[in-house]
Image (tube, grey):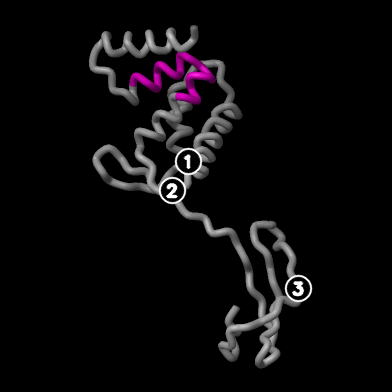
């Protein structure tokens, strides 16, 4: 760590402790050249996820958009908010673990549908009908048949 007083590139750590919020480490350092002390903070660098939309535009990942879509799909269904929060957390963790920083919106939609399939099948069909943009009853029935076939 470069000294803020003399710009010498070497210093030694005298004391380390977590901050009150426990989201960073506070370090007291001493310059090996001039002997002056200074404080640094170490935090985890978070790289934002970017969703690539169907039209090629990009926007920051927003877990609230997924939660709102799930709430609409689960409206008047016996699904708790805690369950939906867990689904969103699982999806976000899955995306973060993939190490890809740019995620196609189709992948996000498929992850949501995979999770919804296990939570509530009616909500799954509601979400799929909007996400897959069914044009007619035949395409809707194909999706229902796929759902029924995956159960057996």
Residue 143, percent from left and from top: 35, 13
The residue sitting at 47% across, 54% down in the picture is 47
Image height of 104 relative to 3, above or below: above
Whether label 3 touches label 2, CB < 8 Å: no
Per the picture, the main secondary structure of the magenta-coloured stretch is helix
Residue 20, percent from left and from top: 71, 60
Which residues are the magenta region?
114-129
Q: CA distance from mark 1 to mark 3?
A: 36 Å
**Which one is earlier in the sequence, the residue at label 3 or at label 2?**
3
| Mark 2 burial class by Cα count in 10 Å: few <14, some 14-19, many 20+ | some
- Could you tell me which secondary element the residue under label 1 belongs to? helix
Image height of 40 relative to 116, above or below: below
Q: CA distance from mark 3 to mark 2?
A: 34 Å
Answer whether residue 61 is magenta in the image.
Answer: no
- Could you tell me which secondary element the residue under label 2 belongs to? loop
- Could you tell me which secondary element the residue under label 3 belongs to? strand
The residue sitting at 58% across, 23% down in the picture is 80
The residue sitting at 40% across, 16% down in the picture is 125
| Mark 3 burial class by Cα count in 10 Å: few <14, some 14-19, many 20+ | few
Whether label 1 touches label 2, CB < 8 Å: yes
Q: Indicate left or right for 26 with 133 as reference.
A: right
Q: Indicate left or right for 84 with 56 as reference.
A: right
Residue 22, percent from left and from top: 69, 57
Image quarter hosting the N terminus: bottom right
Q: Which image quarter: residue 104? A: top left
Residue 75, percent from left and from top: 47, 20
Q: Which image quarter: residue 73? A: top left
Would you name the residue on which mark 3 appears?
15
The residue sitting at 43% across, 48% down in the picture is 49
Would you name the residue on which mark 1 appears?
95
- Which label sits on residue 49? 2
**Which one is earlier in the sequence, the residue at label 1 or at label 3?**
3
């Amino acid at each position: 760590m470069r000294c803020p007083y003399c710009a010498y590139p070497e210093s030694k750590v005298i004391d380390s402790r977590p901050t009150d919020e426990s989201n960073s480490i506070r370090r007291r350092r001493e310059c090996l050249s001039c002997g002056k002390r200074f404080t640094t903070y170490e935090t985890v660098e978070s790289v934002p996820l970017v969703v690539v939309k169907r039209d090629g535009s990009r926007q920051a990942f927003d877990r609230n958009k997924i939660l709102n879509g799930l709430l609409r799909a689960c409206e008047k269904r016996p699904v708790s908010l805690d369950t939906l929060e867990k689904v969103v957390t699982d999806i976000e963790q899955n995306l973060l673990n993939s190490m890809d920083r740019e995620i196609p919106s189709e992948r996000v939609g498929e992850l949501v549908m995979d999770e919804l399939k296990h939570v509530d099948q009616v909500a799954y069909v509601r979400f799929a009908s909007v996400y897959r943009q069914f044009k007619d009853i035949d395409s809707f029935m194909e999706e229902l048949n796929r759902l029924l076939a995956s159960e057996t």
